[in-house]
Amino acid sequence: MKLNDLRDFSKDDVLAALGLTSKPSTSERLLGGLSIFGVGLLVGAGAALLLAPKSGEALRADLGERFCHRRNEEAESPPPPEAETPNGEART
């Protein structure tokens, strides 16, 4: 073994020779966690699409009707009464 051979060793090579590994950095752990979360989101969205009782077009139409119906109900409903203090006076 020559001195030039030692220069080619990296930190991971030395740790592996000793039977050790380097500790993952915070960014590596965060990236791993976010990637697992992203895969879970994709799998969940795919399962939801496969198991949905309605087609996408019917679901969008149904949601649109509900939204318009609630918006019309809110527009037609009277404003809430003014809040009163315990002595019966109206708050400003």
Image: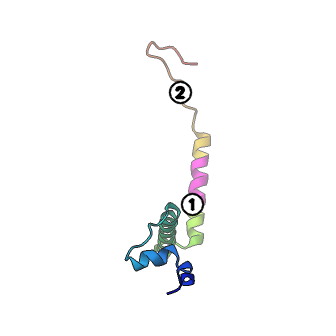
Name the main secondary structure of what is drawn in magenta.
Answer: helix
Mark 2, Cα crowd under 10 Å, few <14 / some 14-19 / many 20+, is few
Q: Residue furthest left?
A: 19
Residue 91's place in the image compared with 79, above or below, is above
Percent position of residue 46, x then y:
50, 74
Q: Residues within 10 Å of mark 1 (few under 14, many from 20)?
A: few
Picture coordinates of residue 21 (x, y %)?
42, 72
Give the distance between the C-alpha atoms of the residues marked 1 and 2, in whole angstroms. Answer: 31 Å
Task: Give the answer, above or below, for where 66 lies relative to 55.
Answer: above
Q: Amino acid at mark 1?
A: Leu
Identified at 57% across, 49% down, the residue is 70
* Colouring chosen for the image of the structure: rainbow
Front-lying residue, 18 or 28: 18
Q: Which residues are magenta?
A: 63-71
Q: Secondary structure at mark 2?
A: loop
What residue is disc 2 on?
81
- Is the C terminus in the top left, top right, bottom left or bottom right quadrant? top right
18 is within the stretch colored magenta: no
Q: Which residue is mark 1?
A: 63
Three-letter code for the amino acid on which mark 2 is drawn:
Pro
Q: How far across and how far down the image is residue 74, in percent?
A: 58, 42
Residue depicted at x 61% and y 47% = 72
State which tag comes first along the sequence, 1 or 2. 1
Residue at (58% x, 52% y) in the render:
69
Judge from the rendering whether residue 22 lies leftward or rightward of residue 59; answer left or right. left
66 or 30: nearer the eye? 30
Nearer to us in this view, 27 or 62: 27
